[in-house]
Image: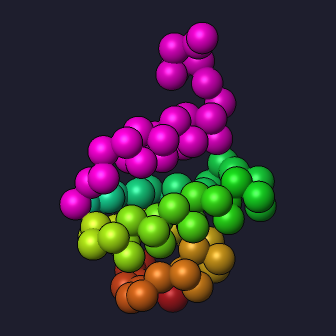
């Protein structure tokens, strides 16, 4: 098994998601959670983030992805337009 720092970006993101699933956190902060993922894994991550929110966790996501924005309850746009 490789140390986390030797994993690819997508692998690191999936490890972080697995850790969250074990802890049932009250707050999830996700910075570009799907940035290094293919479409199938992106869908899985978004499904799990929605699941955390439905279970009562506050999920805060920073992303440039339209597919991420589409699954959010609230969107706050920051930056230049």
Residues 56 and 77: in front is: 56
User: How many dots with numbers?
Assistant: 0
Where residue 48 sits in the image (x, y, percent)?
Answer: 51, 62
Residue at 48% x, 46% y is 17
Magenta stretch in the rendered image: 1-26
Q: Residue 65 occupies which quadrant of the picture?
A: bottom right
Vertical arrangement, residue 33 with respect to residue 17, above or below:
below
Residue at 55% x, 81% y is 71
Residue 21 is left or right of residue 41, and the answer is left
Where residue 76 sits in the image (x, y, percent)?
Answer: 37, 85
Residue at 33% x, 58% y is 29
Residue 80 is left or right of residue 40, and the answer is left
Q: Is residue 24 magenta?
A: yes
Q: In this rendering, does residue 44 appear at all?
A: yes
Residues 55 and 75: in front is: 55
Vertical arrangement, residue 23 with respect to residue 33, above or below:
above
Residue 42 is left or right of residue 77, and the answer is right
Magenta segment main secondary structure: helix
Q: Residue furthest right?
A: 39
Q: Is residue 2 magenta?
A: yes
Work out which quarter of the rendered image holds the N terminus and state it: top right
Where residue 62 sits in the image (x, y, percent)?
Answer: 43, 66
Q: In this rendering, does residue 9 appear at all?
A: no
Residue 42 is left or right of residue 70, and the answer is right
């Amino acid at each position: 098994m490789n140390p986390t720092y030797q994993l690819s970006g997508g692998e690191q993101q999936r490890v972080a998601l697995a850790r969250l699933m074990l802890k049932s956190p009250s707050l999830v902060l996700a910075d570009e959670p799907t940035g290094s993922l293919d479409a199938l894994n992106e869908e899985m991550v978004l499904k799990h983030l929605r699941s955390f929110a439905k279970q009562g966790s506050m999920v805060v996501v920073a992303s440039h992805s339209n597919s991420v924005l589409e699954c959010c309850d609230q969107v706050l746009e920051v930056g230049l337009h």
